[in-house]
Image: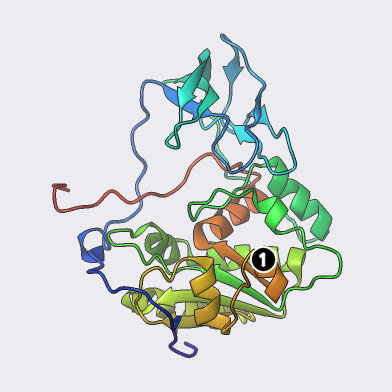
Amino acid sequence: MGLVSTFKKGGVHPDDKKSLAKASVIERIPLPKELIVSMAQHLGVPATCLKKKGDVVVAGEKIGTASGFISAEVHSPVDGVVKEIRKVRLANGALADAVVILPDREQKTTFTTKYDYSSLTSEELLASIKDLGIVGMGGATFPTHVKLQIPVGKSVDAFVVNGVECEPYLTADYRVMMEKGKEVLEGIMIISKIINPKRMIIGIELNKKDAIEHLEALIKEKNYPIEVMGLKMKYPQGDEKQLLKATINKEIPSGKLPIDIGAVVCNLGTVNAIYEAISFHKPLIERVITISGEGIKN
């Protein structure tokens, strides 16, 4: 583990409450009777719907296509039939088209065949990330293919993977690290082929020491050029500005982006999604979430 650090200005220290769900392994929830898939699940321009009522869809099939530079492809998360296309109200108050899908009782589509991507160029990897609809999993949902397109004249000094998960109660990224550590590390190496960083760093707060030790052991086993940096517990260290100050001691100027200081930041869940996309041709059709709190029995 590298230097124990944090950002200097501000921050609070809430009770992390992570013990409530930390030991709970990832499990799949039962399928609902219907799924509502919005065409605006990402930052930027909503996707254009490609389906109509009565269409049969399979898991991973494209049901919405990106309609702008900052936009994303949308895919069906299940095998099923389109019940209807309707407007839905999003959490931000906006209206968006949505595909309502009735899932088949038996889900036949799987993503278990692993493909050899070793001969793919950085351009081909980036095109796959775009086509498979990968967006930021840390909350902003920014289209990842846009983030990983490094502008001409810019270079990446540091690729920082955000494994901080500083919010109280949340343990989703922690469980991904513990259960899918090898996949996360392979995802980091895939991204490194695209952006060619000088350093690769995973930032993790010290309330997840077992995750730090687990990833360090895997890194040593594979001899990956990846650093794990333990960080003091402080909210909101998961914000990319605070994270970059904590890990590489650089500040993003007002109105600028991380690449303007030679950095790229990806959430740990995004890295795992890229691994699955490139290795198994699996679109972004699911994610790990935390269900926790004092009011939950199990």
Q: Amino acid at mark 1?
A: Lys
Q: Position of residue 3 (x, y in %)?
A: 48, 90
Whether residue 147 appears in this view of the structure is: yes
In the image: residue 12, left or right of residue 162: left
Q: Residue at x 76, y 54 (%)?
A: 125
- Viewer-nearest residue: 9 or 91: 9
Whether residue 114 appears in this view of the structure is: no
The quarter of the displayed image where residue 105 is located: top left
Q: Position of residue 123 (x, y in %)?
A: 82, 55
Vertical placement of residue 248 versus 185, above or below: below
Q: Residue at x 71, y 79 (%)?
A: 157
The quarter of the displayed image where residue 22 is located: bottom left
Which residue, given by chain and number where applicable, does mark 1 sit on? 256
Q: Secondary structure at mark 1?
A: loop
Q: Position of residue 211 (x, y in %)?
A: 40, 73
In the image: residue 116, left or right of residue 275: right
Vertical placement of residue 183 versus 137, above or below: below
The residue sitting at the right extreme is 152
Q: Residue at x 49, y 75 (%)?
A: 203
Q: Position of residue 4 (x, y in %)?
A: 43, 88
